[in-house]
Image (cartoon, helix red, strand yellow):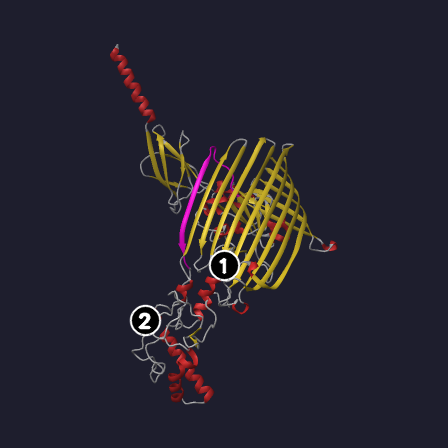
Amino acid sequence: MKQRYVLLIVLFTICTLGAFAQQTVTGYVFTADNREPILGATVMATGTKIGAATDINGKFTLTNVPNTARSVVVSYVGMKSQTVTIKPNMNIYLEPDARSLDEVVVQVAYGSAKKSTLTGAVSQVGTEHIDLRPVSSVTSALEGTTSGVQINSTYGQPGSNPAVRIRGFGSVNGSSAPLYVLDGVPFSGDIFELNPADIESMTVLKDAASSALYGNRASNGVILITTKKGKSNKLSVNLRVSQGTYTRGIPEYKLLSPQEFMEVSWLNLRNSRMTDKKASAAEAGEYASKNLIADALYLNIFNKANDALFDANGKLVADAQILPGYADDLDWYDATIRRGARQEYSLSANAAGDKSDYYFSVGYLKENGYVVGSDFKRLTGRANMNLRPKKWFTTGFSLNGSYQKSNLADNGSGSFKNPFMYSRTIAPIYPVHLHNADGSYRTDALGNLQYDPGSYTNDNGDVVLTRNQFGDRHVAWENELDKDRIVRNTLEATFYTEFKFLKDFTFTLKGQTSMRNNVNDTFDNPTIGNGKGNNGRASQSLNRYREYNFQQQLNWNREFDKHTISALLGHENYYWYHKYAHGRKSNIKVPGQDNFSNFSAIISLSGYEEDYATESYLGRVRYNYDDKYTAEVSFRRDGSSRFAKAVRWGNFGSVGASWMVSREDFMKPVK
């Protein structure tokens, strides 16, 4: 009897251990047609809640999977789901599912629609594309992913918005920038205020049929931006750290060497002597050899006397060498261009349930540009919450704040402070720092190197010219002493309430307000450059913005048999206020202090206020039959405070239709 009990206990123990035995499942997911890895595919162990998403290489790893699980289910938007038996080194290939693609819901003007029912040109980019790129501006994620959209960041200045053009330029002198709509509300702030890690998707409305409901503001296209909300059924916390470096994408032009420049300068002086003085070639060449330094260049960086540099043909003598002190000090790019660096940190948390969902995030970005002195810092915070206390009642809000600080580099094509213009234009024989006649560095009383402003005073009190170019200008020195700084603070809040009644009706109230302060401080030093003639000067520009938007929308949607009809009626109020103040002063009192109050002479002082208001009525009717034929009509009437009452109102409308040929019976045999 005892042996029987012992045997039962042993069998129970073995069964229990077998039930709790676990395994690790790994594999890769690819597309069946071109064998490309799929990023973001969901892999779930059957009969469990254990799952994972594939990485950029299509790899997935499931840990602690019970041995009782015999298979995994693999799914991805636009692909046919598969159930695959678990085995070592799994390679899974997903087939495209055209039907599934047609069921994808995309954002459209004042609502959403199935992709198969769109009547206009619409493209959508999801978080899977945004998260792949370490971009500072979320619109940069559209580059290369959306047809008909051109993204151009021309200056390389950290914190500068890339220029976005949808289907080309729509104006010669006016703005060609698109209208941004953030979570259903027109957004007129700086797109750099938004943390790309907070963005769920972006939808580009390219033509009139898709964007007419936004009126004249949509003339350059519309970009709809949707922020993230809670998804997990339990608290999910995510930390993302991104660091890297960057340089110019286009190599610099090939420039003359110091030796080549000397010979070209000799030829130029000889030819001008022949033209102006009617001298013979031999006479003009002899003159150029003796007087090139004194007449044209002012500086000789070679180990030969001024009149012993050239042979009779205008070539540098064979043993002419650059003096050691000068040899390492002729690279102006090295003094003004560096390797840029970027670091970004994002922390977010989200959760969702039957009654509510929420999403919170904070983010920090720091970029040092590849131009010395240019950088950008951004601190952002966001809170999104949605509450569903009743089936017929939903409400929620979003709060977004940011702090931005930019130090700007001058990018004017003709500016002496533009390092590219200066470095390309200055002769390659002129050094960055001051030197003695023997090429050694000329230091100050403390032994520090001194920048070369184009001249200096010697021990006898005489002014010695060191170059015949860019006198009293020095790009590295000026960018080191001067300042061009922008500090920006923003706060935006959106609230909404939604009521469902009579089964097919939904009424939505939405309000949005935002405040933005933008302060631009500049300082031109009194030592060299633009501020020298005024003993230093400073300016300050203050911009304050306020916006309000209030929307009321009534939606009706009805499905019966193969027919689907939806209608929208809406009303919108918009108000924008801007206050501007600017002051400029000169004559610095205490050296080294660039505060605005440290200048005694007022050059200019001005300011103004402006506001703008619109009122809009809009409507749309959409009809679809059997997911094959769709027709849509939209209309908007806008009134603007910028026009006289007699011509204040304008009408905007569109008509669109689509036909899903692939749904027809005669197309079924076609693959």
Which contiguous range is marked in magenta? Answer: 227-247
Identify whether 391 is placed above or below 445.
above
From the viewer's side, name the closer residue of 43 and 285.
285
Is 235 contained in the magenta span? yes
Tell me how far mark 1 sits from mark 2, CA to CA: 35 Å
Badge 2: residue crowd in 10 Å (few <14, some 14–19, many ≥20): some
Magenta segment includes 149 = no
Give the labeled residue for mark 2. 324
Residue 591 is situated, as x and y percent measured from the top left of the image, at 50, 62
Which quadrant, please, contains the N terminus? top left
**Residue 210 in view of the camera:** no
Q: Quadrant of the C terminus?
A: top left
Question: Which residue bears the numbered disc 1?
Answer: 408
Q: Position of residue 419 (x, y in %)?
A: 45, 65
Residues 594 and 96: in front is 594
The amino acid type of the residue labelled 2 equals Pro
Looking at the image, tell me whether mark 1 or mark 2 is earlier in sequence order: 2
* Callout count: 2
Residue 459 is at least partly visible in this image: yes
Q: Position of residue 125 (x, y in %)?
A: 49, 47
Point out residue 338 in the picture as x, y percentages from the top left corner.
40, 60
Residue 214 relative to residue 462: left or right: right
Q: Amino acid at mark 1?
A: Leu
